[in-house]
C-alpha cells in the first residue's frame, strides 16, 4: 500500500510540474492585469484552497479586444465578490481568461465561472461572445503558489509597451486581408444597428443607384438629380424622385429640352424641389444633351469614346472636364458624382468611407482615387460588388460609431484602430 501511495504522489507531482512548465511557456503571449486581493484574512492550508482556471471563447479566435478584456476583468471581480471567493490574479488574452483563486472545492470554482460569464454577458450586451461550456480547473499545491504568482506578474504588460506597441504596428499600411476581416466586422455591426432587412435594402439601393445607366434617359436623370442634390443630399432628393420624374417627363432629354420658360415657372408650384436655378439648369442641360448626341442618337456614346482614352486610376480627369464643359451648373464635385452614378467607380470617393479607412490606417492622406482602389481591391478579394463594399463602409461611418465625432470606446474595431489608440481618442 505504501508503494502504491508513493507512485500516485509521484505522478501527481509530475503533472503539477508539467502544468507549471506550460504556464511559463504561454506567459509571453498573454495580456494580463492583476486584480486587488479581497478578504486577506481567509487562510490557506490544504491543497484544495488554491485553483488555476482556464476558460476560452468558442472557436478560440482572438475576439477579446481591449475593451472586452477590461470588461472581462470587471465581470470577474463582481463574480468573485458575489461568490465570496478571493481572486489572487487574473489574465485575459484575446482568446480567453486565466486566473488563480482561493476556493474550497471545484464546485465553488464552477459557480465563480458561471457568474463571470453571466456578468460579462450583461456588460457586453449585443456584442456578447460565446464562451466554451466547460472550464479547465487544476488544484495548486501551496508550495507551488509562488511559481504561479510569479508567472502572473511576469505576464503583466509594461506600461510603455502598451502605449507604443499598437500605434507602431498600425503605422504600417495594412493589407487587403486585414481589411476583409474589418469589413466582416463592419457588416455585422451594420446589421445589428439597422436590422438585417433594412441594412440589406440600403445596400441594394446604393448599388442600384450606381449601376451603369441602361440608356440616355437614366443617365440624364442621374445628372439632374446630382444638380438637385447640390446643397442638400441624395436622401432628400430621393424623397421627391417620383414627383421630379413626373414633372420632367420621365427625364427623356428630348422632352425636357422642349420645356418652355412658362412651364418652368409652373414647375415651381409642383411638389418638387422648388429651386428656379436648378430647374432652369436641367432644362438647359437637356438642350445641350440633345445637341451633343452623335449619329447614333446617344450622348453616352460620346462618353464611351472619351473614357477609352482616360485614366481611371487618376479619377477620370478627362471625363470630369468634359462634363464640366458640356453642361451648366456642373462643378468638379458634381461632375464627379454624376460620373460615379454612371458607373465610373473611381471618379469620386464617399467622404464617410474615406474617413473610416483613413482612421483605420488602411489608406493614407493621398488622393481620393487611392481610397477607391483599396475599396475595389477589397471587393475583388471578397467576391463583392465595389459599390456594396463602399455602402457598408459609408453606413458604418454614418450610423455607426465612426461618425465625424467618433465614439471609439464602443467601436468593435478599436483594438486595431490607430485613431482609437491615439491619446486624444474619443471615449463617449
Image (tube, grey):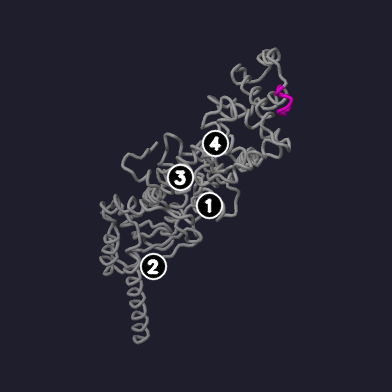
**Res 357 label:** 3
- Callout 2: few (<14), some (14-19), or many (20+) C-alpha neighbours within 10 Å? some
Q: Earlier in the sequence, mark 1 or mark 2?
A: 2
Asked if the stretch drawn in magenta spans residue 353, the answer is no
Quarter of the picture holding the C terminus:
top left
Q: Earlier in the sequence, mark 2 or mark 3?
A: 2
Residue at 38% over, 38% down:
427
SS for tag 1?
A: helix
| Residue 38 appears in the rendering | no
Exactly how many numbered labels are in the figure?
4
**Residue 381: image location, x then y, percent:** 55, 56
Distance between mark 1 and mark 4 Cα atoms? 25 Å
Distance between mark 1 and mark 3 Cα atoms? 12 Å
- Callout 4: few (<14), some (14-19), or many (20+) C-alpha neighbours within 10 Å? many
**Res 71 label:** none
Distance between mark 1 and mark 2 Cα atoms? 45 Å
In this rendering, position of residue 292 left or right of residue 352: right
**Res 320 label:** 4
- Prevailing secondary structure class for the magenta stretch in the rendered image: helix
- Callout 1: few (<14), some (14-19), or many (20+) C-alpha neighbours within 10 Å? many
Distance between mark 2 and mark 3 Cα atoms? 45 Å
Q: Earlier in the sequence, mark 4 or mark 3?
A: 4
Residue corresponding to mark 1: 378
Residue at 63% over, 29% down:
238
SS for tag 2?
A: strand
**Residue 272: image location, x then y, percent:** 65, 20
Of badges 2 and 3, the one in the foreground is: 3
Magenta segment boundaries in residue numbering: 247-257
SS for tag 4?
A: helix
Of badges 1 and 2, the one in the foreground is: 1
Residue corresponding to mark 2: 138
Of badges 4 and 3, the one in the foreground is: 4
Amino acid at each position: 500500500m505504501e508503494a502504491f501511495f508513493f507512485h500516485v504522489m509521484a505522478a501527481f507531482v509530475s503533472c503539477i510540474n508539467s502544468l507549471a512548465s506550460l504556464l511559463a511557456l504561454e506567459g509571453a503571449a498573454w495580456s494580463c492585469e492583476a486584480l486587488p486581493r479581497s478578504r486577506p484574512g481567509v487562510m490557506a492550508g490544504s491543497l484544495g484552497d488554491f485553483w488555476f482556471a482556464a476558460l476560452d471563447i468558442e472557436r478560440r479566435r482572438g475576439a477579446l479586444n481591449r475593451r472586452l478584456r477590461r470588461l472581462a476583468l470587471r465581470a470577474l471581480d463582481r463574480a468573485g465578490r458575489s461568490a465570496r471567493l478571493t481572486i489572487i490574479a487574473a489574465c485575459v488574452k484575446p482568446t480567453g481568461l486565466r486566473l488563480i483563486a482561493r476556493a474550497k472545492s471545484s464546485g465553488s470554482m464552477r459557480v465563480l465561472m458561471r457568474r463571470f460569464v453571466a456578468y460579462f454577458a450583461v456588460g457586453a450586451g449585443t456584442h456578447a461572445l460565446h464562451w466554451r461550456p466547460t472550464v479547465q480547473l487544476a488544484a495548486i499545491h501551496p508550495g507551488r503558489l509562488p511559481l504561479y504568482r510569479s508567472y502572473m506578474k511576469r505576464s503583466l504588460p509594461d506600461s510603455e509597451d502598451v502605449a507604443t506597441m499598437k500605434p507602431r504596428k498600425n503605422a504600417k499600411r495594412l493589407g487587403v486581408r486585414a481589411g476583409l476581416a474589418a469589413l466582416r466586422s463592419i457588416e455585422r455591426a451594420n446589421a445589428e444597428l439597422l436590422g438585417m432587412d433594412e441594412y440589406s435594402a440600403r445596400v441594394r439601393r446604393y448599388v442600384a443607384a450606381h449601376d451603369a445607366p441602361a440608356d440616355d434617359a437614366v443617365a440624364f436623370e442621374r445628372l439632374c438629380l446630382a444638380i438637385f442634390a447640390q446643397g442638400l443630399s441624395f436622401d432628400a432628393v430621393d424623397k421627391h424622385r417620383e414627383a421630379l420624374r413626373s414633372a420632367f417627363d420621365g427625364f427623356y432629354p428630348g422632352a425636357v429640352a422642349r420645356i418652355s420658360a412658362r412651364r418652368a415657372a409652373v414647375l415651381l408650384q409642383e411638389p418638387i424641389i422648388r429651386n428656379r436655378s436648378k430647374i432652369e439648369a436641367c432644362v438647359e442641360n437637356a438642350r445641350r444633351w440633345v445637341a451633343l448626341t452623335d449619329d447614333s442618337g446617344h450622348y453616352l456614346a460620346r462618353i464611351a469614346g472619351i473614357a477609352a482614352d482616360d485614366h481611371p486610376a487618376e479619377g477620370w480627369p478627362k471625363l470630369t472636364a468634359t462634363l464640366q464643359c458640356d453642361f451648366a451648373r456642373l462643378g468638379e464635385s458634381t461632375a464627379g458624382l454624376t460620373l460615379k452614378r454612371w458607373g465610373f467607380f473611381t471618379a469620386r470617393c464617399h467622404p464617410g468611407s474615406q474617413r473610416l479607412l483613413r482612421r483605420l490606417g488602411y489608406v493614407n492622406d493621398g488622393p481620393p482615387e487611392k481610397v477607391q482602389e483599396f475599396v475595389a481591391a477589397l471587393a475583388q478579394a471578397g467576391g463583392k460588388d465595389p459599390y456594396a463594399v463602399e455602402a457598408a463602409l459609408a453606413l458604418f461611418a454614418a450610423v455607426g460609431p465612426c461618425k465625424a465625432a467618433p465614439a471609439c470606446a464602443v467601436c468593435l474595431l478599436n483594438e486595431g484602430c490607430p485613431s482609437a489608440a491615439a491619446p486624444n481618442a474619443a471615449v463617449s
